[in-house]
Image (spheres, grey):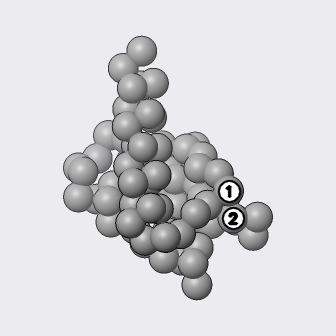
Amino acid sequence: MKIDEEIKKFKNEVKIWSKKLQVFPCGVQLERMKKWGYCSSDRVVYFNSDLLFTRKKLQTYVIVHELFVLDS
């Protein structure tokens, strides 16, 4: 069940940064992929599930980057 806790914490971090940046995605998904993250045209933000096992600073960097991309 540890992975479920990590997913919950990661999605909560996305929520916190969304509020700080005033950028609100329609959804947040974690999945295996080659990129760290991307935004779809329907405003869903996808993150590489490997981020769950990286340093907090890298997670934050990718979250903020993808939210800025979503807002542009």
Residue at 33% across / 66% down in the picture?
61
Name the residue located 38 percent from the left edge and 32 percent from the top edge: 6
SS of the residue under disc 2: loop
Q: Which mark is residue 26?
A: 1
In this rendering, position of residue 64 left or right of residue 48: left
Residue drawn where x is 36% and y is 20% of the image = 2
> Callout 2: few (<14), some (14-19), or many (20+) C-alpha neighbours within 10 Å?
some
Left or right, 45 with respect to 2, comes to: right
Residue 48 is situated, as x and y percent measured from the top left of the image, at 50, 50
Q: Amino acid at mark 2?
A: Arg
Residue 66: give x, y in percent of width and height. Answer: 49, 68
Tell me residue 29's x, y (percent).
Answer: 60, 46
Q: Between residues 51 and 66, which one lies in front from this camera angle?
A: 66
Distance between the Cα atoms at labels 1 and 2? 5 Å
* Residue occupying the point 42% across, 15% down: 1
Q: Quadrant for the C terminus, please.
A: bottom right
Total numbered circles: 2
Q: Secondary structure at mark 1?
A: loop
**Side of 67 relative to 51 (left or right):** right
Answer above or below: position of 1 versus 18: above
The residue where tag 2 is placed is 43
- The part of the image, by quadrant, that contains residue 60 is bottom left
Above or below for 64 versus 45: below
Q: Earlier in the sequence, mark 1 or mark 2?
A: 1
The reply to whether dot 1 and dot 2 touch (C-beta < 8 Å) is yes
Identified by mark 1, the residue type is Cys
Q: Give the farthest residue toward the right.
A: 42
Name the residue at the top extreme: 1
